[in-house]
Image (tube, rainbow, N blue to C red):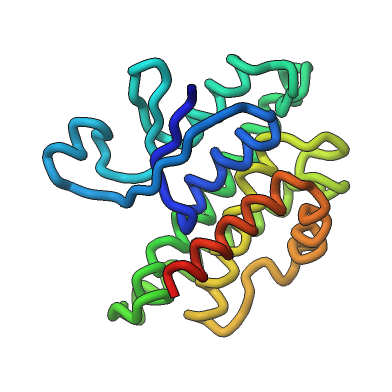
Amino acid sequence: MFRLYGSAFSNYSNKVKLTLVEKGIAFEEIATGPSQEADFLARCPTGKVPYFEVDGTRFCESQAALEYLEERYPDVALLPKDLLARAKVRELIQILEQDVELVARRLLPHALFGAPVADGVKEEVARQLDRGVQAFGRVARFSPYLAGEMFTLADCAAAVHFPLISRITDKVYGRDWFAGLPVATYLEYMKQRPAYAKVLADMAAARAARG
């Protein structure tokens, strides 16, 4: 049994959850948040969520989980057969997460909780977002999925990252950094997929329960 320790509000938890549901894999979801306490660090060395457990072995990092699931459960393939096409999918994920999501994440405490942030930081993040989003736009195809006609692991990542990034940039800068790309149309198309609809419904339920 694959165990997913994470939060319905974590885009990285939902990246893995979407992959699990798309592949039709039975899994157990255990709600937990990040911690730097010693007992938590013994289970997850980074102190972050999500982390995972399979047959008594624990590991962390969402991309490691996606690669494991793709290799362990290949019947519902979320990577192309062609090796170069696989590399292009991984390229999409890497650019989106490294050059866009993690950049925007620097402003997450300010955007969601009102934590102070220096103007210089906002200016630096804006410059980095410009470069990152432009780079991503050069490789994303949106036809209809990010890598083309096939739904891939890149979509499992992007479908949960896009809304958070847009929320952060709109809150901090008053504009959506993805406005120049067909992200809104893409997300509406994604809602037709039952797995993505489930992830969104679970997020809404968790939000309602939290009040």
Rendered view: 34 above or below 55: below
Look at 73% across and 49% down and name the residue there. 138
* x and y percentages locating residue 8 in the rendered image: 49, 54
Camera-side residue of 178 and 114:
114
Camera-side residue of 28 and 109:
28
- In which quarter of the view is residue 66 placed? top right
* x and y percentages locating residue 129 in the rendered image: 54, 63
Rendered view: 105 above or below 11: below
Name, please, the residue furthest toward the left. 38
Camera-side residue of 139 and 48:
48
In the displayed structure image, the side of residue 187 where residue 70 appears, left or right:
left
In the displayed structure image, the side of residue 151 where residue 112 appears, left or right:
left
Name, please, the residue furthest toward the front. 209
Rendered view: 188 above or below 170: above
Name, please, the residue furthest toward the bottom. 174
Look at 39% across and 48% down and name the residue there. 31
Q: How many marks?
A: 0
* x and y percentages locating residue 73 in the rendered image: 64, 17
Look at 39% across and 40% down and name the residue there. 5
Rendered view: 160 above or below 2: below
In the displayed structure image, the side of residue 41 where residue 56 appears, left or right:
right
Camera-side residue of 31 and 151:
31
In the displayed structure image, the side of residue 183 where residue 57 appears, left or right:
left
* x and y percentages locating residue 199 in the rendered image: 62, 51
- Quadrant housing the C terminus: bottom left
Look at 84% across and 39% down and name the residue there. 148
